[in-house]
């Protein structure tokens, strides 16, 4: 058997493509149940789990009902079908209910979760605090995802991404804008404004760069204009092609398919990638030419990642490359 491309192409095994491209958030019981049902339906349609469902305690739990909400999301996670990818967003590490969230949810359902999302992480010290809480709950193997939502957090993004327990950084647009005390206008939270305001754009680029520097997954913020699916898809495509994000949040079921489409390579991109990788394999990974251009292992890494993304977003692949992906 020929060696796997990940074993040949140094760097191609980085974690950037290790997660589904869509992370769907819900915190109300009926919507959480609907999200899990939709995840199962799309998994049946595509033959694989196409998006994560993150059950939300931070914004989903009513004030005074935090413990009851944590118990609810724990039961929902435990009751999810086999193969489901279910995560939970807990309260921030300085919130009075953080430890109780982690102890109950990760302590009881940690084996059924794909990760734990911690919001409002400001520094590596917050990551250590979250990791220690997971360890105390007996869920030390559970990956951490963190939300970067302030100027200080953006400043520390590279250090946060370097922590071995962190698998992904998400950018929190609305909290980031709010953290500036009115110095950034509300228009910067819109679909258009978030890609044009210099401070927001700089922060997004810093988060993505920090992730790529350490092989972690950069996850783009929500689009609140959830009924404007054309604008959502445009924002998702810009996040993927201009800013280097490989994952994005959804806050409404209708946003999931446009995000999958926007983060998916085109048919022409896939065809080119397959042809170049086929030629590389035939040449035992020596340099080849394709349509008048020279390719070697540096460009092979890119085209292999196109194939990985195609597989990740549900594209049917030719037999020549399909065998590299488990059924």
Image: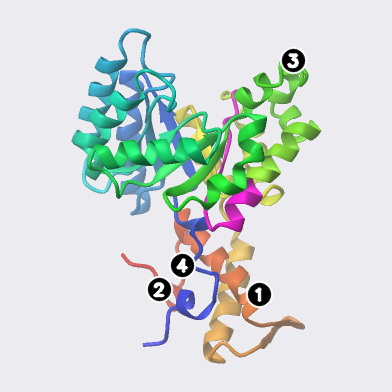
The answer to whether the residue labelled 2 contacts the one labelled 3, judged by CB atoms less than 8 Å apart, is no
The tag earlier along the polypeptide, 3 or 4, is: 3
Q: Which SS class for mark 4?
A: loop
Q: Which SS class for mark 1?
A: helix
As drawn, 47 above or below 248: below
Distance between the alpha carbons at the discs numbered 4 and 2 = 10 Å
Point 61% across, 76% down: residue: 300
- Toward which corner of the image does residue 287 lie, by quadrant? bottom right
Residue 75, label in figure: none
How many discs appear? 4
Quadrant in which the C terminus appears:
bottom left
Question: Residue 57: x percent and y percent?
Answer: 37, 23
- Looking at the image, residue 284 sits to the left or right of residue 231; the answer is left
Q: Which residue is mark 4?
A: 317
What are the residue bounds of the magenta stretch? 208-225
Mark nearer the viewer, 1 or 2: 1
- Toward which corner of the image does residue 266 lie, by quadrant? bottom right
The tag earlier along the polypeptide, 2 or 3, is: 3
The tag earlier along the polypeptide, 1 or 2, is: 1
As drawn, 269 above or below 223: below
Mark nearer the viewer, 2 or 3: 3
Q: Which residue is mark 2?
A: 324
Q: Which SS class for mark 2?
A: loop
Q: Which residue is mark 1?
A: 299
- Looking at the image, residue 220 sits to the left or right of residue 72; the answer is right
Distance between the alpha carbons at the discs numbered 1 and 4 = 20 Å
The tag earlier along the polypeptide, 1 or 4, is: 1
Distance between the alpha carbons at the discs numbered 1 and 2 = 19 Å
């Amino acid at each position: 058997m020929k060696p796997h491309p990940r074993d040949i192409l140094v760097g191609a095994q980085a974690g950037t493509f290790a997660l589904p491209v869509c992370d769907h958030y819900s915190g109300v019981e009926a919507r959480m149940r609907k999200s899990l049902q939709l995840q199962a339906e799309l998994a049946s349609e595509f033959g694989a789990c196409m998006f994560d469902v993150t059950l939300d305690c931070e914004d989903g739990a009513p004030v005074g009902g935090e413990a009851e909400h944590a118990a609810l999301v724990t039961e929902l996670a435990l009751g999810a079908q086999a193969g489901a990818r279910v995560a939970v967003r807990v309260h921030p590490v300085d919130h009075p209910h953080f430890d109780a969230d982690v102890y109950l949810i990760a302590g009881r359902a940690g084996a059924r979760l794909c990760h734990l999302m911690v919001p409002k992480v400001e520094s590596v010290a917050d990551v250590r605090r979250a990791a220690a809480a997971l360890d105390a709950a007996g869920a030390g193997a559970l990956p951490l995802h963190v939300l970067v939502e302030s100027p200080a957090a953006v400043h520390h993004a590279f250090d946060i991404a370097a922590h071995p327990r962190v698998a992904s950084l998400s950018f929190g647009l609305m909290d980031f804008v709010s953290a500036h005390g009115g110095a950034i206008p509300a228009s910067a939270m819109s679909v258009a404004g978030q890609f044009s305001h210099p401070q927001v754009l700089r922060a997004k680029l810093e988060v993505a760069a920090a992730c790529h520097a350490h092989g972690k997954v950069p996850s783009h913020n929500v689009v609140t204009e959830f009924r404007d699916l054309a604008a959502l898809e445009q924002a998702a495509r810009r996040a993927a092609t201009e800013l280097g994000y490989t994952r994005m949040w959804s806050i409404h079921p209708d946003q999931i398919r446009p995000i999958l489409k926007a983060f998916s390579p085109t048919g022409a991109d896939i065809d080119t990638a397959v042809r170049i990788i086929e030629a590389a394999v035939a040449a035992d990974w020596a340099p080849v030419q394709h349509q008048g251009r020279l390719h070697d292992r540096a460009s092979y890494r890119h085209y292999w990642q196109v194939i990985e993304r195609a597989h990740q977003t549900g594209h049917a692949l030719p037999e020549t490359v399909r065998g590299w992906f488990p059924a």
